[in-house]
Amino acid sequence: MKLIAKKILVMRYRFIGDTVLTVPFLRNLREAYPAARIDLMIEPFSGQVLEGCPYVDRVIPFEFRTIHTYSSRSRRSKAAGMFHYWKLIKAEGYDAAFVLKRSLSSALLVLAAGVPRRIGFDTEGRGLLLTDPVRYRHDQHEVENFLDCLRAVDVPIRSTSLELWPSPENEKKIRTLLSDAGWRADQLKIVVHAAASLPAKQWPLERFAEVMKKLKEKHHARFVYTGSSEDAVLYQEIEKRGPFGGLNLCGITSVYENISLYRAADLFFGVDSGPMHVAAAVGVPVVALFGPTDERKWRPWGEGHTIITRRLSCAPCKPHKCRDNECMRQIGVDEALDAVEKKIKQILPKVHFH
């Protein structure tokens, strides 16, 4: 049934990659309801990637650990967190809520707050809590799953591309940063991303080093590393096997600044991760290494990307329960290097590196 609404809440919560993949949903929602107020409830760290998004009127910070059962907080503090967001949602008087987060608590929250139309996935037995339950498909990309929530209420899908909105200030800052580091426009610039949210998604560091060694020897490639301060040690380990002269910006550039940084790169080479999705969103060709996660759902969205994966009998699995990540260890150096070299030939066919 078609949705009639003047105030709409979208609930997504967390993870950088998931947040990036909501962009087509948000754009089509805004095009269908140009005069509506659209609020987005999201975890602040992940929400940085949507800075400047023209499709959202207000971002509501959501501290997911306040209500989710997998956090270490006490039941009393979780109940207090639930009450806080219930009160906030109820006071706003939303006509509809799109619950893109697949948790029971998120569906309970909008039901308890009295939101009349509640659209979301019928996972975790929460279909009865929603007015418009949507089948969640594990065999299609997450972008399409999000868009299915719009299709369920007859919102037309006019476009499915990703986009992000870097600021002029960040563009200038990154240009200056790279220039000060001695980077030149005619050099091959590669974002290398070895860090992942779970150990099972990581590729052996020595294999990253082997690929980088070949690229440096053949192309005089320049490498840049991004991530949290804790991730910096991974790239220090990689550099010990070189050195490769990589620019380690872990803990230095923000998630939002990295949008501009990736735009300045020629290629992204790394594991399935949030930064992989950011790179794809700004049009950077990606060579991605997939193991325990399902590339059908989580591959970089768009054309021109390369996926390397192993379809073992146990895949896809729950990465937090995987003990040996055999699927990642089966991806060899030569296979990864060949994929990167093919991508270099595609994107820089006329450039000669000295």
Image (tube, helix red, strand yellow):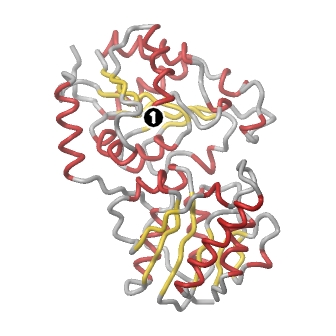
Q: Is residue 148 above or below residue 275?
A: below
| Viewer-side residue, 3 vs 338 | 3
- Residue 125 position in % (x across, y down): 82, 68
Q: Quadrant of the C terminus?
A: top left
Residue 267: x percent and y percent? 37, 33
As displayed, is residue 152 above or below residue 257? below
In the figure, residue 150 lies in which quadrant? bottom right
Q: Find numbered disc 1 in the image and state the secondary structure of the residue it sits on.
A: loop
Residue at 43%, 13% (x, y): give it. 239
Q: What residue is at 71 percent from the left and 84 percent from the top?
A: 131
Residue lying farthest to the front in this orientation: 76
Above or below 283: residue 183: above
Q: On the picture, is 188 further left or further right than 241?
A: left
How crowded is the residue under tag 1: few (<14 C-alpha within 10 Å), some, or many (20+)? many
Residues 251 and 284: in front is 251
- Residues 19 and 297: in front is 19
Q: Nearer the viewer, residue 133 or 144?
A: 133
Q: How many marks?
A: 1
The quarter of the picture where the N terminus appears is bottom right
- Residue 353 left/right relative to 160: left
Where residue 337 sits in the image (x, y, percent)? 48, 20
Residue at 36% in and 30% down: 249
Quarter-of-image position of residue 251: top left
For badge 1, the amino acid type reads Gly
Residue pointed to by mark 1 = 227
Residue 153 coordinates in the image, percent (x, y):
60, 83
